[in-house]
């Protein structure tokens, strides 16, 4: 287990099992932790990995007194699992439940004060698992995917048809036990990729650079079969079941999750806090928006899951 430390927190690399496969997780602890602590469990969005700026959020949470567990899904990033880069919604829900169970069992953690933090596609995942009855103290959903049909409409007809053909080839290949047909997760307008809004490639490139990574450190691909299922995945249908406090953070120029759809989803929840920010889907991860977004997340956590007030 690799150990890291700074003045405000320590971190260590670990693994947990999801359906028998090892998932990589980095656990952050507040420096000098001497009390039972809430934990924030984090994972990234569509085809992305924890190394893409999630550590920046985790360090802020740990500095504020929270433990944090940041994981990669099976088949992505530093986790095991083959074939690689196969994004499957039920599998990722299983990974989320396994990560939450792992976090609850960590020493020094209050199992009643577990927060699920997800961004983009994972923002939809935390809404889904909370709405399906996972016991959580709170959720944070940053620029969340909430509606499959809205995501398809935002993609546009011609790009959807182009990527859909690749998805059909990949799904047929999967049935025949062939290697996946891969497509880029982000591409330029007109390219065969899942996200082709004008801000997709610049946003992803800035995310990579701000994470201290280089192009090619992690694949920017997914097995194309997922595009046949995106339109069927609408976490908003579970929103009414989200009874814990929920922070929903929305970008007003989000080309992937339109603002009005995200606001309508939040309105179905029992205790939503909604913030809307000027900018696009990729802006919350980096400055100048990052400082505002993380400050609002910390304000929300201090109100609803404060450090040092373990539940009986």
Image (spheres, helix red, strand yellow):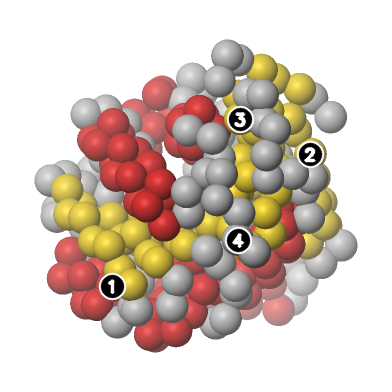
Please give the name of the residue rendered at 49% of the width and 20% of the height, measured from the top-left corner: 212
Name the N-terminal-most of marks 1 and 3. 3
Residue under label 3: 30
Label 1: how many residues lie within 10 Å, few (<14), some (14-19) or many (20+)? many
For this orientation, the residue located farthest to the top is 7
Label 4: how many residues lie within 10 Å, few (<14), some (14-19) or many (20+)? few
Please give the name of the residue rendered at 25% of the width and 69% of the height, measured from the top-left corner: 262
Label 2: how many residues lie within 10 Å, few (<14), some (14-19) or many (20+)? some
Please give the name of the residue rendered at 53% of the width and 57% of the height, measured from the top-left corner: 115
Residue under label 4: 311
Residue under label 1: 266
Please give the name of the residue rendered at 60% of the width and 72% of the height, measured from the top-left corner: 135
Residue under label 2: 14
Q: In this view, does 292 lie to the left or right of 4?
A: left
Nearer to us: label 2 or label 4: 4
Element type at mark 4:
loop
Name the N-terminal-most of marks 1 and 2. 2
Give the CA separation, mark 1 to mark 2. 34 Å
Q: Is residue 66 above or below residue 193?
A: above
């Amino acid at each position: 287990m690799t150990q890291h430390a700074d003045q405000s927190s320590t971190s260590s690399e670990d693994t947990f099992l999801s359906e028998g496969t090892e998932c990589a997780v980095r656990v952050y602890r507040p420096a000098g932790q001497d009390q039972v602590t809430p934990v924030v469990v984090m994972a990234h969005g569509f085809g992305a990995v924890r190394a893409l700026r999630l550590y920046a959020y985790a360090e802020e949470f740990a500095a504020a007194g929270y433990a944090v567990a940041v994981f990669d899904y099976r088949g992505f990033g530093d986790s095991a699992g083959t074939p690689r880069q196969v994004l499957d919604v039920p599998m990722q829900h299983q990974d989320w439940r396994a990560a939450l169970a792992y976090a609850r069992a960590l020493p020094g953690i209050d199992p009643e004060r577990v927060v699920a933090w997800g961004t983009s596609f994972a923002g939809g995942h935390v809404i889904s698992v909370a709405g399906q009855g996972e016991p959580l103290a709170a959720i944070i959903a940053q620029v969340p995917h909430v509606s499959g049909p809205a995501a398809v409409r935002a993609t546009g007809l011609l790009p959807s048809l182009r990527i859909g053909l690749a998805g059909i080839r990949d799904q047929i290949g999967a049935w025949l036990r062939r290697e996946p047909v891969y497509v880029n997760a982000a591409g330029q307008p007109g390219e065969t990729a899942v996200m082709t809004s004008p801000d997709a490639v610049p946003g992803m490139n800035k995310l990579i650079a701000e994470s201290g990574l280089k192009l090619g450190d992690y694949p920017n691909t997914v097995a194309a079969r997922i595009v046949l299922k995106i339109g069927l995945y609408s976490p908003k249908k579970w929103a009414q079941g989200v009874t814990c406090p929920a922070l929903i953070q929305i970008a007003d120029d989000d080309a992937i999750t339109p603002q009005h759809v995200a606001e309508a989803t939040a309105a179905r929840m029992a205790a939503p806090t909604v913030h809307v920010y000027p900018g696009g889907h990729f802006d919350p991860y980096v400055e100048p928006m990052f400082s505002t977004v993380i400050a609002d997340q910390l304000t929300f956590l201090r109100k609803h899951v404060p450090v040092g007030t373990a539940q009986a």
